[in-house]
Image: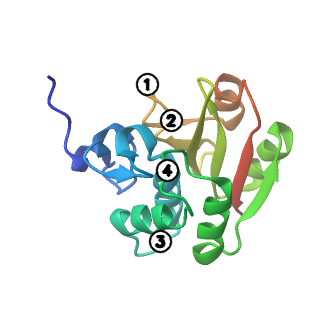
Amino acid sequence: MTELPPISAGFSADGYIVDQDCFSSVRYRTMRGDYNSCGWIAAYNLRHFLGHPVVWEEVLHEMDGMHRLRLPGPTLMRVMRAYLGRYVPDCREADGREAALKLAARSRACIFRYQEERVPHFITCIRLEDGRFRFFNVDDRISDEAEPLDRFAAEHFRHGCVIALAVL
């Protein structure tokens, strides 16, 4: 059996969570965190970007408790909206690929809900000074990478609906 990396290895040097595989020792919605943590991680990363004094364990436990049923499953949009409504009330939402990209292109930071390899997934991206975006916790190949928004979208927004939750 391979030894799993410690939770601390899942963070970037500037404090963003970049690799949910490092959270195998925690539970979220009754499942191992390495499999099912993208929702609370995206919320944590957005709040971290905004400078909130946020602790990852608190985000995990609060969002986990917001689900009505103790069943395995992904973070529900109802829960993500309610959580962001508490802490990021100026967050704006756009549904559909084109509307989501248009909103995200104007944003300082954004959470995308989309399908990564046909599996529902949340990620956070932040705008860099050069106009590119820095994407966190995308997949096993991309944990922390900067690229133009349109290039990322062409590669990753191929299936299903795309939703953007953005801070302008």
- The kind of secondary structure element at disc 4 is loop
Mark 2 or mark 3: whose residue is earlier in sequence: 3
Looking at the rendered image, the disc whose residue lies closer to the viewer, 3 or 4, is 4
| Pointers 4 and 2 in contact (C-beta within 8 Å) | no
Q: Nearer the viewer, residue 76 or 2?
A: 76
Q: Is residue 67 above or below residue 115?
A: below
Direction from residue 86 to residue 52 in the image, left or right: left
Q: Which mark is residue 51?
A: 3
Q: Are marks 1 and 2 in contact (CB under 8 Å)?
A: yes
Answer left or right for 83 relative to 58: right
Q: Residue at x 54, y 67 (%)?
A: 66
For the residues marked 4 and 2, what is the alpha-carbon distance in whole angstroms?
24 Å
Q: Amino acid at mark 3?
A: Gly
Helix, strand or loop under label 2: loop
Q: Which mark is residue 71?
A: 4
Q: CA distance from mark 4 to mark 1?
A: 29 Å
Please name the amino acid that badge 4 sits on: Leu
Q: Amino acid at mark 1?
A: Arg
